[in-house]
Image: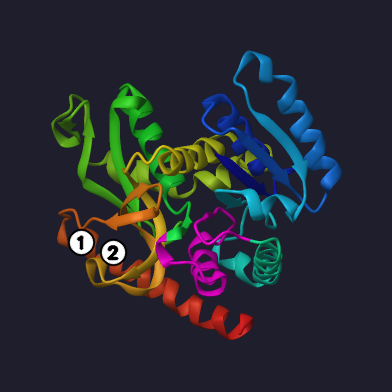
Amino acid sequence: MKISIIGGGGLVGSCAAYALQCGGIFSEIALLDVNQELAVGQALDLQHGGPSVADQRIVGGGYEHIASSDIVCITAGLRRKPDESRLDLINRNTDLFVSILNDVQRGGLRRDAIVLVVSNPVDILTYVAADRLGLPSEQVLGLGTQLDTIRFCSLIAERMQAPPTQTRALILGEHGDSMVPIWSSATIGGLPLDKFPGWNPSLAGELFTRTRGSGAEVIKRKGGAGFAVGIAIRDVVEAIALDRRSVLPVSTVQSGCYGIRDVALSVPTVVGRQGAVDRLEIDLWPKEVQGLRASGGALQKTLATVLQRVG
C-alpha cells in the first residue's frame, strides 16, 4: 500500500513519515512538497534508516505520485502563531489549500483513494475537501481531535501517575477552541476515572485547559508540534491500511450524528479501509452533547464565510 504525504518536507509531514516508517505497514511512502529538494532530502534521510526498520520504498517528489496512492495525507499549511487560534488561520490557509486540492485532482486522484486532511483549521478544510474532491464523503477524513485526545490522555496519565497506554479519554467536536472533553467515559485500566485512586474532580478543569492550550504551548516552546502529530496521523492511516475498524475521534462531514449536520467535526468514528465506515452515538452527559452541538454551531458560522470565499 502506498501513501503520499503532501507537505512531506515540513515538520509535521516528515514526522508522520518517520512514524509510518517505524510502523512498517506501507510498502511505499512518498513525500511531496513545494520544495521538492527538501522532500527528496527528507526521503533520503528516512531511506538510510530502512535496513534497520522495514522493506519500504521512500521517495520524494511531486504530484506524479498521486495516481498510484491509496491514501493521500495533506499536511501542508502555514504555521499557527502562538497567540493565534486555529480558526484565525482560515484567511491565510484557504487559498493555499484549494490550490493543493486542484493539484491533487490534476494528479489523477483515484476514485477509491482515502484523503486525510491534517492542515489547519482541519474541520473547515476537511469540509472543503469533501465538497471539492468529488469522492464519497466517507473517504475524506480530517485528523480532527485524535491529536487532542492523545494529548488529553497523556496529561491525565502524567497527573495520575498512571500508564499512558491504559488511560482512555476522548476530546470531541472542533480541533480548536470549542473542543469538548468527554469525562463521562474516561477510564484508567478500565476503571472509571472518578473511581481511580487520587482523582479529584477539581483536576478536570486544569487538565482540560492545558489540553486545549497544548498546541500553543508546544509552538511557544519549540516552534511547532511534530512528533505527537505524526503519531496521531499514524493511528488513523494504519487503521485505514489494516482495515482495523478502530473507533477514533476523526473529523468528517456530519449528517445527523448527535443532531449535527452540514459541518465537519469529530465524533466517535469507525475507521477502516473504506474510510469513515460508521459514526457512533455513544452515551454522553447532557452537557457534553450540548457542548458538541455548540461546537458544530461555531464551526458552521466560519464555514459559511469560507464557502463564500472559495466559491
Q: Is residue 109 visible?
A: yes
Amino acid bearing label 1: Lys
The segment highlighted magenta reads 109-138
On the image, the x and y values in percent for residue 158 come to 38, 26
The alpha-carbon separation of the residues under discs 1 and 2 comes to 6 Å
Give left or right: position of 142 versus 245: right
- For the N terminus, the image quarter is top right
On the image, the x and y values in percent for residue 80 come to 64, 55
On the image, the x and y values in percent for residue 208 come to 36, 46
Amino acid bearing label 2: Gly
Tag 1's secondary structure?
A: helix
Residue at left offset 42%, top offset 58%: 251
Classify mark 1: residues with Cα within 10 Å, few (<14), some (14-19) or many (20+). few
In the foreground, 275 or 172 = 275
Give left or right: position of 219 versus 46: left
Residue at left offset 51%, top offset 30%: 25
Q: Quadrant of residue 262?
A: bottom left
